[in-house]
Image: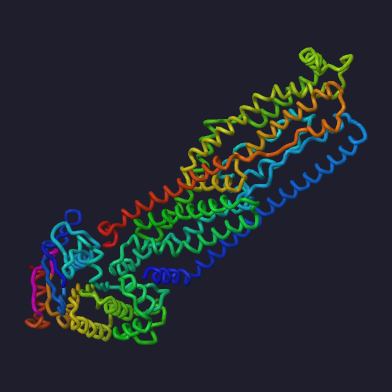
Amino acid sequence: MLETLKLTKRFNGHVAVNELNLAIKPGEVFALLGPNGAGKTTTINLLLGFLTPDAGEARVNGTSVAADPIAARRHIAYIPEQVMLYPRFTGVENLDYFSTLGGRRHTREELLLLLKKAGLPAEAADRRVGTYSKGMRQKVGIALALATEAKALLLDEPTSGLDPAASHEFSLLLRKLAGQGIAILMATHDLFRAREDATRIGILLDGKLAGEYATNDIKHVDLEKLYLKHLRA
Amino acid sequence: MTSHLFRLELRLLVRERAAWVLLALFAAALGYGLWNGGRVAGRQREAAAAIAQDTEAFQAQVRQHLGQQAIDPKAIAGRGTMAVLPPAPLPLLATGQSDLSPGHEAVVLWRLADSGDTRSELENPSHLLAGRFDLAFVLVWLFPLFLLALVYDLMAGDRESGTLRLALAQGVTPWRWMARRALARSLPMLILAALATLTAGFFGGSGGTGTRLVLALAVVLAYGLFWVALAIAVNAVARSAASAATSLGAAWVLLVLVAPTLLNVAVETLYPTPSRPELVAAGRKASGEAEKRGGELLNSFYRDHPELAPPGQQADFAAQHLTVQTEVGRAVEPVRQKFDEQLARQQTAVGQWRFLSPAIAMHEALTDLAGTGYWRHRAFREQVGGLRQAVSAFFTPRIHKRESITMSDFDQLPRFEFREEPAGVWMGRVLASLAGMLALAGALGVWAWRSLRPGRLGLLSA
């Protein structure tokens, strides 16, 4: 479970995240929408413990991130906008490296299976990552989430730059992960994917949650209107 | 888990072509340094052996003559007594002072007042460091460069590319992650440096060098550790691989080039030695004047030492020459003494301030361990000074009295035996250098550890 309780972060007097309250349950996909500078990435950095909050608290699976960032991170899988892997390693070696860093050691067969589950073509697993597309690198990121058996997944603009087919494929994987009981927070600009993949949507403006909606209650076109209404308000 | 990650880090390293090139170049430099050091050591060993053989042959010849009749002391005084500095314990490790100060000296009665060795003055420490392309040069100067070329980008590049965010998101502490990587990336260079040090000990060392070799290994590894700690500290704060490389390059220039030069300038300013031309001019002047007053000096000498006056007080050329020499020695002595004292002060100051730069501490430690350092050569020069006095005391009365030398006299002819500096003294200097380097590495490590605490990784969010 992912939680933020009045989470606040300031940079040189500017409030980037302002008393943010979130609670994302296992199996839930929460899409955090907002323009550039709204505080989406800062929220993710606070949940990862890469930043220290000025007030409030972030919790992952009940562990306070500020109190024990290392323990909190052990419950998290993180997929940034660009999954940066070691280009001299193959896909399976990258997965081996990062999952071992996360404290999980797998056999080569297990790693290959995880990559397969994440949708990476079998022939690509032993190819150097330097030759991978962005979509393929994201699949290694998904495989990493599976390998570390994370309780929560943080996604930062995951579909940015993906072609529609790759984006659709990614959505399917995301739903599969949610189905496994993982709490997912996805920061995105992509209204369509947010409506398709998320169970709830929050609109973040100036670090504050301006509105929160269940995706079952709104249509694509309504979401766009709501979003623009919040922006203009 | 840790060993698996370590292997993966090594695999990442071996996939870099540049790493292989660097390792090959470093290995070649070490090999050339060892070979060069071996050549110098070999020449010195050959010279010492030739002297020993020559001396033995001469003594056998003299004994043969003495078996038949006593001989005139002037006949053997001109030959001189050889003072030989025994081969250094680990000569392949560092040429040190052995290419500046001679390892042997003929103490000849007729030239006792000569200035002897004045070439062993303290050189620019950076020249001392560069000196010859020996193993010490490679270890002090090039080892940090090659090492930094492999470890300059421990974290900065990952921070720049974004890999660091993914790595740290797995729940590993930045300190542990970087320390493991630093160890993996520096290990091949450290192994090469250690192997070269062991090679210097096994192939060039004389007997009983075990302690020196162990200490040399510790000093080399501590020096490497210092540079790795510096790379960790720089990477803890550098925003990009390029800025890390620039900072570490600047640190190398500062610590290996600038600091020794500045220290040299400082000690030469604080303790200036009389110039070499001044020493030579003082000798020439005294010599010229004394020769002019030769007869007068001799008469004066016999007035002071009537017991040495020959029958009829007819001084011959040899007696006059000895008297002139004594006078020259007396005139030059204050200049020479000042020269030696200032050199010792300079070297003491270098020793005290060597922690300004680990490169100075490393060089001092290596030459001490090799047995080619300033203090061992100074001890040799001092002991040669003692031999001069003994030779003078042996021959002068006999020449003045025109006494012949018998077999029993010849057995009492002063011979040179070098007394090594007590182990505790050189070991104290080496251990202080070692402790200093470890302390500097430790301080950098603590600073890096503090900078890498999870709550202080603000750069990650950029």
- B120, B209: nearer the viewer: B209
Q: How many marks?
A: 0
Image quadrant where residue A108 sits: bottom left
Is residue A205 magenta-colored? yes
Q: Position of residue B376 (x, y in %)?
A: 62, 40
The span picked out in magenta is: A204-214
Look at the image and tell me whether residue B333 can be seen: yes
Above or below, B247 relative to B290: below
Residue B136 x/y as whole percent: 58, 51
Position of B358 with respect to A164 (left or right) is right
**Which colour style is shown?**
rainbow
Q: Quadrant of residue A109?
A: bottom left
Name the magenta segment's main secondary structure.
Answer: strand
Q: Is residue A210 above or below residue B302?
A: below
Q: Quadrant of residue A62?
A: bottom left
Residue A40 in the image: state x and y as whole percent: 19, 68
User: Horizontal placement of A50 versus B274: left or right?
Assistant: left
Identity of the residue drawn at 25% across and 82% down:
A170
* Left or right of residue B383: residue B183: left
Q: Quadrant of the C terminus of chain A?
A: bottom left
Q: Quadrant of the N terminus of chain A?
A: bottom left
- Residue ID at (65%, 51%): B206
Residue furthest top as drawn: B303
Q: Which residue, as the protein is rendered here, is positioned at the far front?
A: B408
Is B267 positioned to the left or the right of B380 in the image?
left
Residue B221, image x, y percentages: 49, 55
Residue A50 higher or lower than B340, as above or below: below
Q: Is residue B77 visible?
A: no
Instruction: Based on the picture, tell me whether residue B64 belongs to the magenta stretch.
Output: no
